[in-house]
Image (cartoon, rainbow, N blue to C red):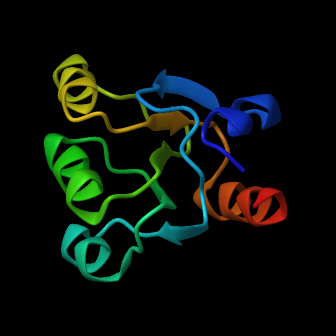
Amino acid sequence: MTVSGLLEHGFREVVLADGERDITGAYMGDLLSWVMGRAKADCAWITIMSNLNVIAVASLADTACVILTEGVELPEDVRAAAELRDVNVLSTDLPSYEAAVLLSQLI
C-alpha cells in the first residue's frame, strides 16, 4: 500500500510530499523518544501529536507517513516544516486504535 492509496480509504491528505512511498508497517505512539527508538523505516506512524517535533522524529525515523487521528489538525508552521522536510502527513477522525485496525487490513 502506498501513502496516496490510503486516501481511497478515508484518510485525508494534509501534506503529500511523496504519495508513492510504500508503507510496510505501522507504529502507534505519542512519546517521541519511544517513536525515535522503535518506529521502523517506511512505517505509518499513528499519533495525536501535532507539534514541530513530530516532523523531526518522522524525518529521523524515516517513516512513510504520519497519520494524525481523532480529528487532530496540523498547525500551519508544522505543515510548512513537513513540506520542507518532505514528510507525508495524513489525518482521520477515527480514534487511534480504529485507524490502526483499518491500516492493518490495508497493508
| Residue 23 as seen in the image, left or right of residue 79 | right
Q: Residue at x 80, y 37 (%)?
A: 9
Return the x and y of residue 29 as percentages of the image width and height. 41, 69
Relative to 40, say whether 18 is above or below.
above
Q: 89 or 48: nearer the eye?
A: 89
| Residue 99 as seen in the image, left or right of residue 43 | right
Q: Residue at x 40, y 67 (%)?
A: 41
Relative to 49, say whether 77 is above or below.
above
| Residue 52 as seen in the image, left or right of residue 12 | left
Q: 56 or 72: nearer the eye?
A: 56
Relative to 76, say whether 70 is above or below.
below
- Splitting the image into 4 quarters, where does residue 87 fall? top left
Q: Quadrant of the C terminus?
A: bottom right
Return the x and y of residue 33 as percentages of the image width and height. 19, 75
Return the x and y of residue 98 as percentages of the image width and height. 73, 58
Q: Residue at x 70, y 30 (%)?
A: 7
| Residue 82 as seen in the image, left or right of residue 30 | left
Q: Residue at x 16, y 22 (%)?
A: 77
Q: How many marks?
A: 0
